[in-house]
Amino acid sequence: MANSTPKSKLRRPLTTIALAVALVMAGSATVSAQIVEYRGGGFLTNFTQACQQGGWGPGPAYVNARYRPPRLGNNGPSTRLAFYTGHYANSFVLPQGDLTNRFKAVSGGGTGSVTYFFAGRPQMRVTQQTPSTVRRGTAHLRLKGQIRRFDDYPGCRVTFDISLTKRP
């Protein structure tokens, strides 16, 4: 059996510790680079007559929702918001930036028995967000807002009110 010097006995644990620290830091970088998404539910309300002619309303519709705010984790510059009913989904994407109190043109689409992009150009706005700024550590948030040309019906405007929880 070879003799070990005090230096070699010390070097092995230090190497192990350095490797462990490097792995933890690499894991932290992977976690911070993940998509940041919030899921929850709420209601679509205040359907205009044009929405009702398309089969929405007049009463509230319960929806599940998913929200990806921009510039958090791997989310990139777009804002994404989707609403799911029992048998149908509407999703909306603002290519750059945040939804604000001012209506902004978004891309939209729906999925029922087929998936399609809306022919018209919907518009969205967020009239209330709690907390007002979403950060990486924000665990819960509430969004209220409106959508013009909802479900691709001209003249259809709805109000949404959703509560969301961050998902890992």
Image (spheres, helix red, strand yellow):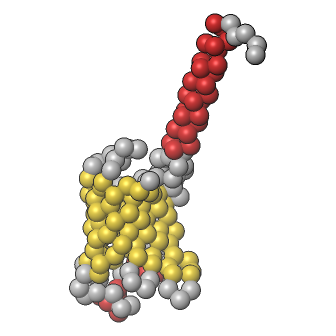
Q: Is residue 2 above or below residue 164?
A: above
Q: Residue at x 68, y 7 (%)?
A: 5
| Residue 168 in sight | yes
Picture coordinates of residue 149, whole percent (x, y): 41, 77
Picture coordinates of residue 123, whole percent (x, y): 42, 68
Q: Residue at x 55, y 39 (%)?
A: 27
Side (left or right) of 22 relative to 157? right
Q: Is residue 25 above or below residue 160?
A: above
Q: Residue at x 64, y 7 (%)?
A: 6
**Residue 119, quarter of the rendered image:** bottom right
The single residue placed furthest to the right in the displayed view is 2
Total tally of numbered discs in the picture: 0
Picture coordinates of residue 44, whole percent (x, y): 30, 76
Picture coordinates of residue 162, whole percent (x, y): 29, 66
For this rendering, which residue is in front, 90 or 95?
Answer: 90
For this rendering, which residue is in front, 6 or 119?
Answer: 6
| Residue 97 in sight | no
What quarter of the picture does the N terminus occupy? top right
Q: Residue at x 29, y 48 (%)?
A: 132
Q: Is residue 28 above or below residue 11?
A: below
Side (left or right) of 160 relative to 149? left
